[in-house]
């Protein structure tokens, strides 16, 4: 099968959807010329194909971008708003959590807000405290909102196409480290991946590792190492849609393994993992043979020093392995 | 301006230029991570503005902050150490290029969320006014920053409360790859002050003495009456940040502005009108080069911060 980079999959998803539906358009900062299709190249070739009316460069105005995208969506348009760095979601926060996500409810279902907010997130490139964060937890407590975080080019394409067709607002978080470092199989034929459906990235029997975004690859690495070294069988589950959560897939896995480690890149405290842990504790505690452990960033911001960023700040396969061993040790013999 | 000060201003501008060239080098070698925004071409703005401040005045700026940090008195070795993420950097390798800061120098930092430091500047000025101090806050930002809500709220507030803040827009005519004409309803940024009834002036930001004089005058107004918007028209010679392929501006345009090199203009003035010799200025250039060389060596030889230090100063000790 043909392979493409993560960012190319994103690009192809948008192009296909814009060809399909004239209500889809994209707006954002420097998405046209700036760096040849956005600073990460996600909008490459789109200006040439769709013209200035559908590929819109905005002023440096996150309030106006997020709000005008939502307003156009109220009218039945299907805007894709590119927020250059997910850290800037904080500026859009009001228009998302008080505007976009509440409008269907407040209008008694007579209108909705089919907007997609795409943003590059994540650490690992030395960009420090304002250009490296994973902001999903900032947005988690907003009824009406949907948050998607793909981990592979295949998922990125299928999920983004679904997000664009989705009738409610979607936050679509793309790890910037994956853009041009991760290549994966993407079929030529059209396909969609449903929103609100988790994916078992690797089947296993001993420990469930729930991981998001770039961390899925650290979890898979940990699974490979532990299988080779210790004969352990890890099941890696990627929620893909973080909000609302596909509880069934996660609970099925936990009921099978009885042991859970949750991995994400944002700080552990108050993070997405806390929600997953709570759901498991509420609905499957009798299946557990040990504590639910979380692996994530420590309680500090992303540092400039790159050794510290890579080895200390970011979760790694080594840290996941340690957590897996801790869970097993607690529960006694497998 | 006294001769000595003119000479040190020249030295400072050359120092910033050499520092930025070296930073670009280190970045290309993969020694600096993240995003690196060079000040090359804009030296006259930072140097001219800061030369007019008094030590009590506060300075706050955006992420293109190396030049302003140097003008505020940060040592090049501390800047390089921070760029390399070392323990001897101004924030011990936490903040890196976009977040240089040293409050002991009354330099309140580089800020990487565009525009977000403008309301902060208003608050700093509010504190000074509240306490009856006659310190002013000098807040520097780009043309792009004037399109975000932060700018408008901060300017309005500063006028309503008559805050002692000097707003300095470094109009280098682009916000990333977007020209000011494509992003701003008015391309003369100073006009944005008028809807808040705020006085303003536009100066040639390639001429350090013009910037200096205008800043002095503006600061007098700020201390007595309240806010002022100073727009310095300038140009960045390099890309927005390293790795910018610069597809959005014509070679001719860049060449035209390169002829107006702020260091070249100042040098000519120093030689032709202000009685300096080639030798003196060449010596200053050499001095700057040596300082930069030593600074890089210092930074390279410095240790990485210990991981536990990342937990320092999250909360008050
Ligand atoms: C709120 C926010 N939006 C977008 C960005 C990304 N970004 C960084 S610099 C920049 C352009 C800023 O232009 P300007 O204010 O003119 O400053 P210059 O880079 O020209 O010095 C953009 C869009 C950001 N850092 N913060
Ligand atoms: Mg600019």
Image (spheres, coloured by chain):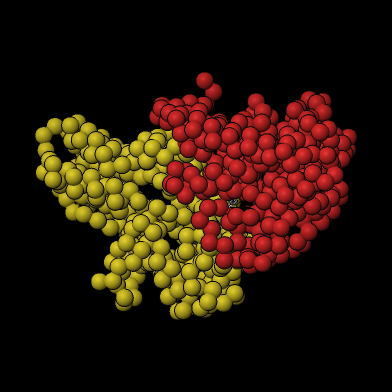
- Pick the residue in front: A8 or A114: A8
| Residue A315 lies in quadrant | top left
User: Which x, y percent locates residue B193?
Assistant: 81, 51
User: Which x, y percent locates residue B160?
Assistant: 82, 42
* Left or right of A248 in this view: B176: right
Q: Residue furthest top?
A: B317
Identity of the residue drawn at 53% across and 53% down: B242
User: Which x, y percent locates residue B48?
Assistant: 76, 41
User: Which x, y percent locates residue B2?
Assistant: 83, 32
Identity of the residue drawn at 74% across and 63% down: B185
- Pick the residue in front: A7 or B160: A7
B74, above or below B155, in the image: above
- Pick the residue in front: B164 or B49: B49
A185, above or below A173, in the image: below
Instruction: Tell me if I can see residue A273 in this picture.
Output: no
A87, above or below A180, in the image: above
- Pick the residue in front: A87 or A255: A87
Identity of the residue drawn at 29% across and 47% down: A218
* Left or right of B240 in this view: B140: right
Note the chain letter of the yellow one.
A
Identity of the residue drawn at 63% across and 66% down: B251
* Left or right of B31 in this view: A235: left
A187, above or below B137, in the image: below
Instruction: Tell me if I can see residue A207 in this picture.
Output: yes
The hue in which chain B appears in the rendered picture of the protein: red
């Amino acid at each position: 099968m043909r392979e493409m980079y993560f960012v190319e999959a994103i690009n192809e998803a948008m192009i296909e959807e814009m060809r399909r539906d004239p209500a889809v358009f994209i707006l954002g900062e420097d998405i046209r010329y700036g760096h040849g299709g956005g600073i990460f190249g996600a909008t490459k070739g789109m200006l040439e194909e769709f013209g200035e009316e559908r590929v819109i460069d905005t002023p440096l105005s996150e309030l106006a971008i997020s709000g005008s995208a939502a307003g156009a969506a109220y009218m039945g348009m299907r805007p894709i708003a590119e927020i250059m760095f997910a850290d800037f979601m904080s500026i859009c926060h009001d228009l998302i959590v008080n505007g976009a996500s509440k409008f269907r409810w407040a209008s008694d279902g007579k209108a909705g807000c089919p907007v997609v907010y795409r943003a590059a997130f994540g650490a690992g490139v030395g960009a420090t405290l304002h250009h490296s964060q994973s902001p999903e937890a900032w947005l988690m407590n907003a009824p009406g909102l949907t948050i998607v975080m793909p981990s592979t080019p295949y998922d990125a394409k299928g999920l983004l196409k679904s997000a664009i067709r989705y009738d409610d607002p979607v936050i679509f978080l793309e790890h910037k480290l994956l853009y041009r470092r991760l290549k994966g199989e993407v079929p030529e034929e059209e396909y969609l991946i449903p929103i609100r459906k988790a994916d078992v990235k690797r089947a296993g029997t001993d420990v469930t590792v729930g991981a998001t975004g770039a961390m899925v690859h650290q979890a898979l690495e940990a699974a490979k190492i532990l299988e080779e070294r210790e004969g352990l069988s890890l099941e890696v589950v990627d929620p893909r849609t973080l909000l609302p959560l596909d509880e069934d897939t996660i609970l099925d896995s936990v009921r099978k393994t009885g042991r859970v480690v949750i991995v994400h890149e944002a700080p552990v405290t108050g993070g997405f993992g806390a929600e997953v842990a709570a759901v498991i504790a509420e609905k499957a505690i009798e299946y557990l043979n040990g504590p639910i452990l979380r692996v994530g960033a420590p309680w500090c911001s992303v540092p400039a020093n790159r050794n510290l960023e890579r080895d200390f700040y970011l979760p790694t396969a080594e840290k996941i392995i340690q957590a897996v061993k801790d869970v097993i040790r607690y529960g006694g013999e497998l | 301006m006294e001769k000595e000060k003119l000479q040190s201003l020249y030295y400072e501008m050359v120092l910033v230029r050499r520092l930025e060239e070296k930073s670009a080098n280190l970045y290309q070698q993969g020694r600096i991570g993240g995003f690196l925004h060079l000040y090359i071409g804009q030296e006259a703005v930072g140097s001219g503005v800061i030369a007019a401040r008094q030590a009590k005045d506060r300075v706050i700026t955006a992420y293109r902050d190396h030049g302003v940090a140097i003008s505020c008195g940060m040592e090049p070795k501390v800047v390089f150490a921070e760029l390399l993420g070392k323990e001897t950097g101004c924030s011990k390798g936490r903040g890196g290029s976009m977040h240089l800061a040293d409050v002991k120098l009354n330099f309140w930092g580089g800020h990487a969320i565009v525009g977000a430091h403008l309301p902060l500047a208003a608050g700093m000025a509010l504190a000074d006014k509240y306490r009856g101090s006659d310190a002013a806050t000098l807040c520097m930002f780009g043309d792009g920053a004037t399109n975000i809500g932060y700018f408008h709220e901060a300017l309005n507030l500063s006028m309503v409360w008559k805050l002692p803040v000097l707003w300095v827009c470094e109009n280098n005519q682009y916000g990333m790859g977007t020209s000011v004409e494509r992003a701003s309803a008015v391309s003369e940024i100073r006009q944005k002050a008028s809807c808040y009834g705020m006085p303003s002036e536009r100066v040639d930001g390639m001429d350090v003495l013009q910037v200096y004089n205008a800043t002095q005058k503006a600061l007098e107004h700020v201390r007595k009456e309240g806010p002022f918007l100073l727009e310095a028209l300038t140009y960045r010679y390099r890309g927005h940040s390293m790795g910018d392929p610069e597809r959005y501006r014509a070679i001719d345009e860049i060449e035209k502005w390169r002829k107006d090199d702020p260091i070249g203009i100042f040098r000519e003035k120093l030689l032709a009108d202000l009685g300096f010799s080639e030798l003196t200025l060449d010596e200053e250039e050499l001095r700057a080069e040596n300082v930069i060389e030593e600074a890089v060596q210092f930074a390279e030889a410095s240790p990485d911060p210990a991981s536990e230090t990342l937990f320092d100063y999250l909360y008050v000790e």
